[in-house]
Image (spheres, rainbow, N blue to C red):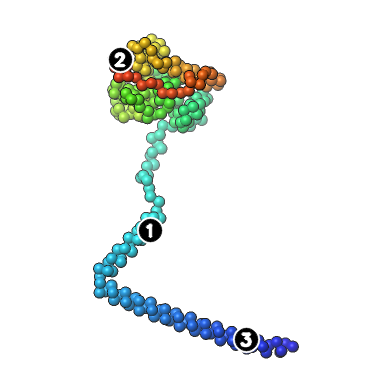
Amino acid sequence: MHAGLTAPVRPLARAAAIVIRDIGNGMLVISHNTLALLGLLLVALFTVFASQPQLLHSVEHHALTWLNERREARIEPSLAPDEPGAAQRVAVIDLSDLPRPQAAISQWLARRYKVAPEAVARIVQEAWTLGDRARIDPTLILAVVAIESNFNPFAQSPVGAQGLMQVMTRVHDDKYDSFGGQRAALDPLANVRVGVQVLKDCIQRAGSVAEGLRFYVGAANLPDDGGYANKVLFEQDLLKAVAAGRPTPSRSIKESTPSPAPAASSEQVALVSASL
């Protein structure tokens, strides 16, 4: 029975071997022909380029241009050069480095005015340092910053008041000399330092905080300061409550919503300049 099965298989095996051999021969012939065609093509290209050097130069130029474009496309373009020292210029501090009242105020101001807590924390720390030197309550300094600029260090009024405390740069330009010049008005710390100096002068000249705020906003010789002093003092009450861990005083939304102080007119600026 085994011999009977083997007999029909042998012709099939021979047929398969013939087919495989024929396929192999065919592939070999195709390979030879392909190589021959490639050789002829290379000879033809060499002949053409040898007879026309400018054509070879043009092809090389286009090929190199394409390769360079592909290489540049794979490289992410740099929008600006590296500047490792940039982080050192930013005036920030970690809230954990502040005493609890200052940290609480920093967090509250950051939420209220939608600014970075670390940047506000540095301003809060500076307000405490300057307040101690100038004998001014630091919450008053921060309240002036809040009403004047909403903690925007690049704020500018139509009459030229600039920075966090909206100091009239052209009026108090001499006060920026120790900071390198008038451009320091847009540096947060320099602006606050000059602003506190101006605020201190106003309070001393007026004899009280409320009247000093009238001087500061440019309404010393006017019948009304537009509610500026009340806004600053109310903001100060909020900050004192936050620092003490008490609930913030409730008042109407309109009164408690922060908004920049109205810009002083040129006449008001002249009055303040003369009084200082």
* Proximity of marks 2 and 3: CB atoms separated by less than 8 Å: no
Q: Residue at x 41, y 29 (%)?
A: 152
Whichever of callouts 2 and 3 sits on the residue coming sooner in the sequence is: 3
| Residue 226 position in % (x across, y down) | 40, 16
Type of amino acid under label 2: Leu
* Left or right: where 112 falls relative to 71: right
Image quarter (top left, top right, bottom left or bottom right) of the N terminus: bottom right
Q: Residue at x 45, y 25 (%)?
A: 124
Q: Residue at x 40, y 21 (%)?
A: 261
Image quarter (top left, top right, bottom left or bottom right) of the C terminus: top left
**Residue 233 quadrant:** top left
Work out how far the residue at label 1 is from the one at label 2, CA to CA, in angstroms. 66 Å
List the residue tagged with mark 1: 70
Type of amino acid under label 1: Arg
Foreground of the two, 82 or 11: 11
* Residue 185 visible at all: yes
Q: Residue at x 29, y 28 (%)?
A: 181
**The label number, if any, that marks residue 271 in the structure image:** 2
Number of marks present in the image shown: 3
| Residue 50 position in % (x across, y down) | 26, 74
Whichever of callouts 1 and 2 sits on the residue coming sooner in the sequence is: 1
Work out how far the residue at label 2 is from the one at label 3, CA to CA, in angstroms. 117 Å
**The label number, if any, that marks residue 202 in the structure image:** none
CA neighbours of label 2 inside 10 A, class few (<14), some (14 to 19), many (20+): some
Whichever of callouts 1 and 3 sits on the residue coming sooner in the sequence is: 3
List the residue tagged with mark 3: 12
